[in-house]
Amino acid sequence: MNTNLPSLEGYLFSDQNENDEMWSLRLETNENCNILCKYCYASATSRNKDKFIDLNTVKKRVEQAIPLGLRSVIFIGPGEPLLYPKLFEALEYLKTVQIIPVIITNGTLITEEIGKKLLALNVSILMKYDGMNPDTQDYLAGKKGTGKKIHHALSILQKIGYENEQKLGLSFVTTNKNISEASDFWLFCRKNNIFPNMEQIGDEGRAKEYEDLLLDSGSFFQLKQKLSEMDKELGYSWDPSMPLPGIGCNQFLYSCYVSMKNKMGAVTLLRQRS
Ligand code: SF4
């Protein structure tokens, strides 16, 4: 049985952090988003598109973090990172200092040209994928057509070379609306060599307006038990009491979260909703 589960480069590290280094910066860059997910913890909208952090701040944070052992920068939102006007300049900079960039994106803005640029800049991608059925995604994203755009983005990424789980992950936020599609999602990722990231909806942000989407106590744990059993048949072994299915969840041991207001903190709560 294999306890070395698929991972996403720059997003998770499996080796021991023996020297208490800070390997990842989880960086907020911009607040605006082009969709309106019903579970968005940041309640992101298309407003505030002129509010974003400047490139020098990104560079300064990275320069400060490199001597602490920095390996990756995770562009976490709280809006859509592909709307951050300085994103590609920041990625170019990270390439020069050999830090792995990771973007957590809703995928709707990915074209072949953008995908190729991201691949050339060694970017790992964790893309929203909340439903096997595009209509489910449309409902959760609050915007018709989103599901088809995301499915199309996935086919683009696979076609251009994002074809192993080390560089491509899909993120599924489990709600009452899509929990019936969760095991198919998991199997789809395993069969296609894609890193699966599965979380449960939190009672925060815009989710407060959609209480019917919140999961009953116990249902996410039951789902994890089911996924763990499915994984056993594929040769993977993990404990369903892990907070996130199939992920060691040790990010808090080596990550620092930097908000747009330059507030810093250890990662105690995993927030990634793009
Ligand atoms: S969860 Fe992500 S993609 Fe959805 S509205 Fe919020 S920022 Fe946008």
Image (cartoon, rainbow, N blue to C red):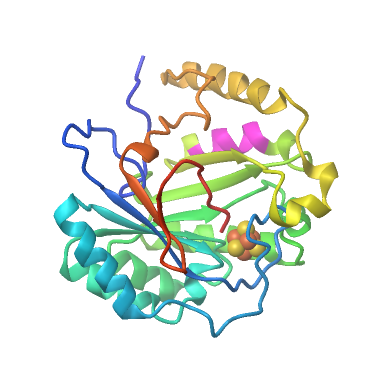
Looking at the rendered image, the quarter that the C terminus falls into is bottom right
Between 230 and 47, which is closer to the camera in this rendering?
47
Q: Residue at x 39, y 75 (%)?
A: 87
Q: Which residues are magenta?
A: 182-189
Q: Is residue 9 left or right of residue 237?
A: left
Residue 271, percent from left and from top: 53, 49
Q: Which quadrant of the structure image shows residue 62?
A: bottom left
Where does residue 200 sit, x and y in percent of width and height? Answer: 64, 39
Q: Is residue 121 visible?
A: no
Asked which quadrant contains residue 195, the reply is: top left
In this rendering, position of residue 134 left or right of residue 68: right
Which quadrant is home to the N terminus? top left
Was residue 185 drawn as part of the magenta stretch in this picture? yes
Residue occupying the far bottom of the picture: 50
Q: Quadrant of ligand 1?
A: bottom right
Which residue is found at the position 46% from the left and 62% from the top?
A: 259
Q: Residue at x 48, y 17 (%)?
A: 239
